[in-house]
Amino acid sequence: MSPADDPRRRLLLLGDGLWAAAALRHLAVRHVLPAVVERSCPTDDSLARAAREAGLPLVRLADVNAPDAREWIRSLAPDLLLSVSYDQIFQRPLLSPPHPPVLNLHAGHPDRQRGRAVLCWQLLEGVRELELTVMRVTRGIDRGPVLGVSHVALGEDDEYGQALERVCAAVPAVLDQALAALAGERALPGDAAAQPVYYPRRRAGDEWLDWNRDSADLLRLIRALAPPNCLAATRLGERELRVRRAAACPDFPAGVAGVPGAVIGRDPVRGLLVKTGDGALWLGELWTPEGERVPQQEFHLSDRFGNGTLAELESLRRRVGRLEERLAALEGVAHAG
């Protein structure tokens, strides 16, 4: 069955972000969407804007598995539910008749990549191609049959935003493929020999740069956390900073001594040259956590950026030392009295 022959369906989209918005815009042309469900705490307003453009009601469900939520879904009489970066796990009542099938759009192949933030993790691995898939949701994490696959090529220097644009461009075709497969009750064959990796949700603290690591690792982290992600983080003394852009320094001489994190060069175009565990990186843009760009003139040669957790531990060590000194002084005064 070709996408053109795919029957018109009544779909309920649950999702978040740019690729959920891409799915909505494509599906609204050929199918019926009675409503759109967004996360309780959406990462941006892209899905809300797409819903407004399509004239669709936008709702939030505190618990998609709660009886009142299931009753509301039944009242819409959808033929199927589509999850695109939705942050709630569908439990047994929603996955059983009389509820319709639930599909999930996933930035990886479930035979190999399961779990959360798969696009970000694969950028950290340095992959040059990812598989965008649509699977049927069953009990268990990303274990359902695959209905559609699209191979998305990534550029060597792609940041997160650019990779996300490539994923969004591939969404329409893989959705059409999956809906046609669902109508024909077909699924793609799995790879029984594959060993899937379960990626965890990225948490606060994962964004800190450890300058003792190799340049390639640091550069991948900076690119993986580029907008619309949270940005990689570092410290200069007690000051917290975000790294918006960085570039490799391939001509940096091997074996040069130095302290990782130290500013060892400056260039008006390329930015600050910062020593890493195996070489150096150019930091092109640094920002405050509040979103203000920090001028290069505020930094000096021999400034030393902190190493993530090591910097945090060192800061805590100094603070505890000062508190111990104050406590000892107070005890001395008390004994003297």
Image: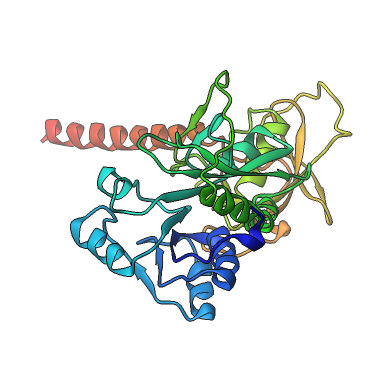
Position in image of residue 277 (x %, y %): 69, 26
Q: Which colour scheme is used?
A: rainbow
Which one is nearer the viewer's eye here, 292 or 158?
158
Which is more toward the observer, 169 or 123?
169
Q: How many labels does the image show?
A: 0
Identify which residue, 205 or 158, lies in the foreground.
158
Q: In which quarter of the image is residue 176?
A: bottom right
Asked whether, in this view, residue 291 is left or right of residue 11, the answer is right
Which residue occupies 65% across, 32% down?
Answer: 125
Q: Which residue is drawn at 29% across and 56% down?
A: 64
Vertical relation: 200 (above or below) 155:
above
Q: In the depicted view, which residue is nearer to us: 108 or 182?
A: 182
Could you say where residue 66 lies in the image, as x and y percent from the top left? 21, 55
Q: Is residue 299 above or below residue 136?
A: below
Q: In the displayed image of the protein, which residue is found farthest to the left?
A: 337
- Which quarter of the picture shows residue 171? bottom right
- Which percent across, then down, holds residue 242? 59, 52
**Residue that sits furthest to the top in the current view:** 193
Q: Residue at x 35, y 62 (%)?
A: 40
| Residue 306 point in image, percent of width and height | 57, 38
Q: In which quadrant of the rendered image does the C terminus lie? A: top left
Indicate left or right for 62 with 4 as reference: left
Name the image quarter holding residue 23.
bottom right
